[in-house]
Amino acid sequence: MRPKTTARLIAFASSLTLGVGLLVSVAAPASATWNGGAKLCTHTNPEIKETSGLSRSTYKGKRKRKTFFLHNDSGDTGRFFAVNKKCKTRAVITVRGVQPKDWEDMAPGPDHTLWFGDIGDNGENRPSISVTRIKEPRKIRDRSVAGTTYTLRYPDGAHNSEAMMLHPRTGRVYVITKNRVAGTIYRAPKVLDPNGVNVMTKVVGGVPNGLSGADWARNGERFVLRGYKSVFIYDNMYGEPVRTPVPAGHTFGEAVTWHRNSRALILGGEGVGTALWKLKDS
Protein backbone atom coordinates (compact mmCIF):
# COMPACT_ATOMS: atom_id res chain seq x y z
CA MET A 1 0.00 0.00 0.00
CA ARG A 2 1.26 3.51 -0.80
CA PRO A 3 2.30 5.73 2.11
CA LYS A 4 -0.19 8.43 3.17
CA THR A 5 2.28 10.59 5.00
CA THR A 6 5.84 11.77 4.39
CA ALA A 7 8.41 9.54 6.05
CA ARG A 8 9.88 11.00 9.24
CA LEU A 9 12.45 9.33 11.47
CA ILE A 10 12.72 9.21 15.21
CA ALA A 11 15.26 6.89 16.82
CA PHE A 12 14.31 5.03 19.98
CA ALA A 13 16.93 3.31 22.13
CA SER A 14 15.34 0.58 24.20
CA SER A 15 16.32 -2.29 26.40
CA LEU A 16 16.42 -5.77 24.86
CA THR A 17 14.56 -7.16 27.83
CA LEU A 18 12.14 -4.40 28.73
CA GLY A 19 11.70 -2.60 25.41
CA VAL A 20 11.75 0.83 27.08
CA GLY A 21 14.26 3.64 26.93
CA LEU A 22 15.10 7.16 25.84
CA LEU A 23 13.19 8.73 22.96
CA VAL A 24 15.28 10.93 20.69
CA SER A 25 13.97 12.81 17.67
CA VAL A 26 16.50 13.06 14.84
CA ALA A 27 16.54 13.25 11.05
CA ALA A 28 18.32 10.39 9.32
CA PRO A 29 21.31 11.76 7.40
CA ALA A 30 21.53 11.06 3.69
CA SER A 31 24.45 8.89 2.64
CA ALA A 32 27.13 10.09 0.24
CA THR A 33 28.75 6.66 -0.06
CA TRP A 34 25.93 4.83 -1.83
CA ASN A 35 25.74 5.31 -5.59
CA GLY A 36 22.61 6.39 -7.43
CA GLY A 37 21.73 2.85 -8.42
CA ALA A 38 21.68 0.94 -11.70
CA LYS A 39 19.09 -1.24 -13.38
CA LEU A 40 20.04 -4.89 -13.04
CA CYS A 41 17.42 -6.46 -15.33
CA THR A 42 13.75 -6.30 -16.36
CA HIS A 43 11.14 -9.00 -15.81
CA THR A 44 9.37 -10.40 -18.86
CA ASN A 45 7.20 -12.96 -17.06
CA PRO A 46 3.62 -11.56 -16.98
CA GLU A 47 2.88 -13.62 -13.85
CA ILE A 48 5.33 -11.48 -11.87
CA LYS A 49 2.81 -8.71 -11.33
CA GLU A 50 3.46 -7.19 -7.94
CA THR A 51 6.80 -8.08 -6.38
CA SER A 52 6.41 -7.73 -2.63
CA GLY A 53 9.11 -10.02 -1.20
CA LEU A 54 12.64 -10.63 -2.48
CA SER A 55 15.49 -12.86 -1.30
CA ARG A 56 18.95 -13.88 -2.43
CA SER A 57 19.85 -17.56 -2.68
CA THR A 58 21.37 -19.04 0.47
CA TYR A 59 23.87 -21.28 -1.30
CA LYS A 60 27.55 -20.40 -1.63
CA GLY A 61 30.90 -21.95 -2.52
CA LYS A 62 30.74 -24.64 -5.18
CA ARG A 63 26.97 -24.40 -5.15
CA LYS A 64 26.84 -20.60 -5.27
CA ARG A 65 23.82 -19.44 -7.22
CA LYS A 66 23.26 -16.15 -8.97
CA THR A 67 19.58 -16.55 -8.23
CA PHE A 68 16.94 -14.39 -6.60
CA PHE A 69 13.59 -15.50 -5.23
CA LEU A 70 10.51 -13.31 -5.21
CA HIS A 71 6.78 -13.49 -4.64
CA ASN A 72 3.75 -11.42 -5.51
CA ASP A 73 1.67 -9.37 -3.10
CA SER A 74 -1.75 -10.47 -1.78
CA GLY A 75 -4.06 -12.17 -4.26
CA ASP A 76 -1.61 -14.82 -5.44
CA THR A 77 -1.32 -18.42 -4.32
CA GLY A 78 1.42 -19.81 -2.07
CA ARG A 79 4.04 -19.73 -4.80
CA PHE A 80 7.27 -17.92 -5.50
CA PHE A 81 9.57 -17.42 -8.47
CA ALA A 82 13.26 -18.16 -8.98
CA VAL A 83 14.90 -15.69 -11.38
CA ASN A 84 18.47 -15.29 -12.59
CA LYS A 85 20.53 -12.09 -12.77
CA LYS A 86 18.89 -11.30 -16.12
CA CYS A 87 15.42 -11.56 -14.54
CA LYS A 88 14.63 -14.68 -16.52
CA THR A 89 12.28 -16.99 -14.63
CA ARG A 90 14.04 -20.26 -13.87
CA ALA A 91 11.23 -21.90 -11.90
CA VAL A 92 7.89 -21.42 -10.18
CA ILE A 93 7.82 -23.13 -6.79
CA THR A 94 4.68 -23.79 -4.74
CA VAL A 95 4.60 -24.26 -0.98
CA ARG A 96 2.24 -27.15 -0.36
CA GLY A 97 -0.82 -26.53 1.79
CA VAL A 98 -0.25 -22.78 2.11
CA GLN A 99 -2.86 -20.22 1.03
CA PRO A 100 -1.55 -16.80 2.06
CA LYS A 101 -3.85 -14.10 3.27
CA ASP A 102 -1.31 -11.38 2.56
CA TRP A 103 2.28 -12.43 1.90
CA GLU A 104 4.25 -9.20 2.20
CA ASP A 105 7.90 -10.14 2.55
CA MET A 106 10.37 -13.01 2.40
CA ALA A 107 13.86 -13.46 3.79
CA PRO A 108 16.76 -15.92 3.76
CA GLY A 109 17.63 -17.72 6.97
CA PRO A 110 20.33 -20.05 8.32
CA ASP A 111 20.67 -23.65 7.13
CA HIS A 112 19.52 -22.82 3.60
CA THR A 113 16.04 -21.80 4.63
CA LEU A 114 13.67 -19.30 3.05
CA TRP A 115 10.97 -17.61 5.12
CA PHE A 116 7.70 -16.05 3.97
CA GLY A 117 5.81 -13.49 6.02
CA ASP A 118 2.01 -13.58 5.92
CA ILE A 119 2.10 -10.37 7.90
CA GLY A 120 0.07 -7.81 5.94
CA ASP A 121 -3.28 -6.42 7.01
CA ASN A 122 -5.03 -6.67 3.62
CA GLY A 123 -7.51 -4.08 4.84
CA GLU A 124 -7.48 -4.80 8.58
CA ASN A 125 -4.87 -4.84 11.33
CA ARG A 126 -4.09 -8.28 12.72
CA PRO A 127 -3.19 -9.25 16.31
CA SER A 128 -1.72 -12.53 15.02
CA ILE A 129 0.27 -13.19 11.86
CA SER A 130 2.23 -16.14 10.49
CA VAL A 131 5.56 -17.00 8.93
CA THR A 132 6.35 -20.08 6.84
CA ARG A 133 9.76 -21.72 6.61
CA ILE A 134 10.93 -23.92 3.76
CA LYS A 135 14.24 -25.48 2.79
CA GLU A 136 15.67 -23.84 -0.32
CA PRO A 137 15.42 -26.48 -3.08
CA ARG A 138 18.68 -28.05 -4.17
CA LYS A 139 17.46 -28.13 -7.76
CA ILE A 140 15.87 -25.07 -9.31
CA ARG A 141 12.91 -26.34 -11.32
CA ASP A 142 9.12 -26.11 -11.27
CA ARG A 143 8.05 -28.06 -8.22
CA SER A 144 6.23 -28.03 -4.89
CA VAL A 145 7.94 -28.04 -1.50
CA ALA A 146 6.89 -28.67 2.09
CA GLY A 147 6.79 -25.84 4.59
CA THR A 148 6.31 -25.28 8.32
CA THR A 149 4.07 -22.42 9.42
CA TYR A 150 4.35 -20.64 12.77
CA THR A 151 1.77 -18.32 14.32
CA LEU A 152 3.17 -15.10 15.81
CA ARG A 153 1.27 -12.69 18.03
CA TYR A 154 2.03 -9.08 18.88
CA PRO A 155 2.28 -8.40 22.63
CA ASP A 156 0.29 -5.16 22.38
CA GLY A 157 -2.64 -5.61 20.00
CA ALA A 158 -3.22 -5.56 16.26
CA HIS A 159 -0.82 -4.04 13.71
CA ASN A 160 -0.11 -3.88 10.00
CA SER A 161 3.31 -5.06 8.83
CA GLU A 162 4.97 -5.43 5.44
CA ALA A 163 8.61 -5.97 6.44
CA MET A 164 10.32 -9.05 7.87
CA MET A 165 13.94 -10.16 8.27
CA LEU A 166 15.99 -12.93 9.89
CA HIS A 167 19.31 -12.65 11.60
CA PRO A 168 21.71 -14.74 9.47
CA ARG A 169 23.40 -16.37 12.46
CA THR A 170 20.77 -16.68 15.18
CA GLY A 171 17.83 -17.25 12.85
CA ARG A 172 15.61 -14.95 14.94
CA VAL A 173 12.60 -13.57 13.08
CA TYR A 174 12.02 -9.80 13.18
CA VAL A 175 8.79 -8.14 12.04
CA ILE A 176 8.58 -4.39 11.48
CA THR A 177 5.22 -2.62 11.61
CA LYS A 178 4.06 -0.12 9.03
CA ASN A 179 2.51 2.88 10.76
CA ARG A 180 1.66 6.42 9.73
CA VAL A 181 3.92 8.08 12.29
CA ALA A 182 6.64 5.56 13.17
CA GLY A 183 7.18 1.82 13.01
CA THR A 184 8.23 -0.72 15.60
CA ILE A 185 10.55 -3.73 15.42
CA TYR A 186 9.27 -6.90 17.08
CA ARG A 187 11.32 -10.05 17.68
CA ALA A 188 9.94 -13.58 17.69
CA PRO A 189 11.04 -16.15 20.29
CA LYS A 190 14.34 -17.92 19.72
CA VAL A 191 12.60 -21.28 19.38
CA LEU A 192 9.30 -21.30 17.49
CA ASP A 193 6.49 -23.71 18.28
CA PRO A 194 4.59 -24.82 15.15
CA ASN A 195 1.67 -26.00 17.29
CA GLY A 196 1.20 -22.96 19.50
CA VAL A 197 1.12 -19.18 19.49
CA ASN A 198 4.53 -17.50 19.64
CA VAL A 199 4.31 -14.12 21.36
CA MET A 200 6.77 -11.56 20.03
CA THR A 201 8.72 -8.98 22.02
CA LYS A 202 8.84 -5.27 21.25
CA VAL A 203 12.49 -4.45 20.64
CA VAL A 204 12.74 -0.98 19.09
CA GLY A 205 10.16 1.73 18.51
CA GLY A 206 10.40 4.91 16.47
CA VAL A 207 11.82 3.45 13.25
CA PRO A 208 10.76 5.15 9.98
CA ASN A 209 7.12 5.02 8.97
CA GLY A 210 5.72 3.50 5.78
CA LEU A 211 8.17 0.58 5.71
CA SER A 212 7.54 -2.11 3.12
CA GLY A 213 10.61 -4.39 3.22
CA ALA A 214 13.62 -5.45 5.28
CA ASP A 215 16.66 -7.70 5.17
CA TRP A 216 19.76 -8.52 7.18
CA ALA A 217 23.13 -8.61 5.43
CA ARG A 218 24.64 -12.10 5.09
CA ASN A 219 27.64 -11.14 7.24
CA GLY A 220 25.27 -10.13 10.05
CA GLU A 221 26.87 -6.69 10.44
CA ARG A 222 23.97 -4.51 9.31
CA PHE A 223 20.39 -4.56 8.11
CA VAL A 224 18.16 -2.48 5.86
CA LEU A 225 14.62 -1.19 6.20
CA ARG A 226 13.09 0.10 2.99
CA GLY A 227 10.36 2.61 2.35
CA TYR A 228 8.89 3.80 -0.93
CA LYS A 229 11.35 6.65 -1.46
CA SER A 230 14.33 5.73 0.70
CA VAL A 231 16.18 2.83 2.27
CA PHE A 232 17.54 3.03 5.82
CA ILE A 233 20.76 1.15 6.63
CA TYR A 234 21.46 0.27 10.27
CA ASP A 235 24.79 -0.85 11.71
CA ASN A 236 23.06 -2.12 14.84
CA MET A 237 19.57 -2.45 16.25
CA TYR A 238 19.72 0.72 18.34
CA GLY A 239 21.89 2.98 16.18
CA GLU A 240 20.96 5.85 13.93
CA PRO A 241 20.38 4.74 10.32
CA VAL A 242 21.83 6.17 7.15
CA ARG A 243 19.15 7.14 4.64
CA THR A 244 19.71 6.54 0.92
CA PRO A 245 17.17 7.47 -1.79
CA VAL A 246 15.97 4.69 -4.07
CA PRO A 247 17.20 5.03 -7.69
CA ALA A 248 15.48 7.79 -9.63
CA GLY A 249 14.25 5.35 -12.30
CA HIS A 250 12.98 2.79 -9.80
CA THR A 251 9.21 2.44 -10.08
CA PHE A 252 6.94 2.13 -7.04
CA GLY A 253 8.15 -0.89 -5.11
CA GLU A 254 8.33 -2.70 -1.81
CA ALA A 255 10.96 -5.45 -2.10
CA VAL A 256 14.58 -5.42 -0.95
CA THR A 257 17.38 -7.92 -0.29
CA TRP A 258 21.09 -7.68 0.31
CA HIS A 259 23.50 -8.89 -2.34
CA ARG A 260 25.65 -11.85 -1.30
CA ASN A 261 28.66 -9.57 -0.71
CA SER A 262 26.76 -7.57 1.94
CA ARG A 263 27.76 -4.34 0.19
CA ALA A 264 24.93 -3.88 -2.28
CA LEU A 265 21.13 -3.87 -2.17
CA ILE A 266 18.74 -5.32 -4.73
CA LEU A 267 15.37 -3.55 -5.03
CA GLY A 268 12.20 -4.86 -6.67
CA GLY A 269 9.30 -2.89 -8.11
CA GLU A 270 5.60 -3.55 -8.54
CA GLY A 271 3.88 -4.08 -11.86
CA VAL A 272 4.32 -6.28 -14.92
CA GLY A 273 7.61 -5.63 -16.71
CA THR A 274 9.27 -3.87 -13.79
CA ALA A 275 12.96 -4.18 -13.01
CA LEU A 276 15.40 -5.20 -10.32
CA TRP A 277 17.73 -2.38 -9.31
CA LYS A 278 21.10 -2.48 -7.60
CA LEU A 279 22.34 0.05 -5.06
CA LYS A 280 26.04 -0.25 -4.23
CA ASP A 281 27.94 0.99 -1.21
CA SER A 282 31.09 2.52 -2.59
Image: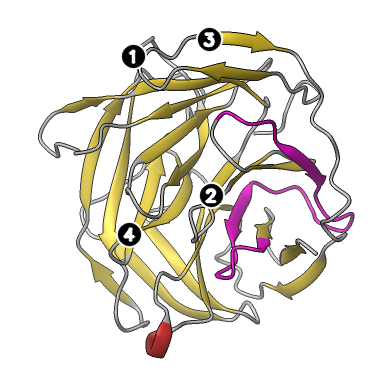
Q: How many marks?
A: 4
Cα separation, mark 2 vs mark 3, equals: 25 Å
Name the quadrant containing residue 23. Answer: top right
Question: Residue type at mark 3?
Answer: Gly
The answer to whether the residue labelled 3 contacts the one labelled 1, judged by CB atoms less than 8 Å apart, is: no
* Nearer to me, 47 or 95: 95
Magenta stretch, overall SS: loop
Q: Secondary structure at mark 1?
A: loop
Mark 1 packing: few (<14 Cα in 10 Å), some, or many (20+)?
some
Cα separation, mark 3 vs mark 1, equals: 18 Å
Q: Secondary structure at mark 4?
A: loop
Residue 110, numbered label: 4
Cα separation, mark 3 vs mark 4, equals: 31 Å
The answer to whether the residue labelled 3 contacts the one labelled 4, judged by CB atoms less than 8 Å apart, is: no
Residue beneath the point at 32% across and 49% down: 171
Question: Residue type at mark 4?
Answer: Pro
Cα separation, mark 2 vs mark 1, equals: 23 Å
* Nearer to me, 134 or 242: 242
For disc 2, the marked residue is: 215
Q: Position of residue 41 (x, y in %)?
A: 72, 75
**Mark 2 / mark 4, whichever is N-terminal:** 4
Mark 3 packing: few (<14 Cα in 10 Å), some, or many (20+)?
few
Above-or-below relation of 88 to 214: below
The answer to whether the residue labelled 2 contacts the one labelled 4, judged by CB atoms less than 8 Å apart, is: no
Question: Residue type at mark 1?
Answer: Pro
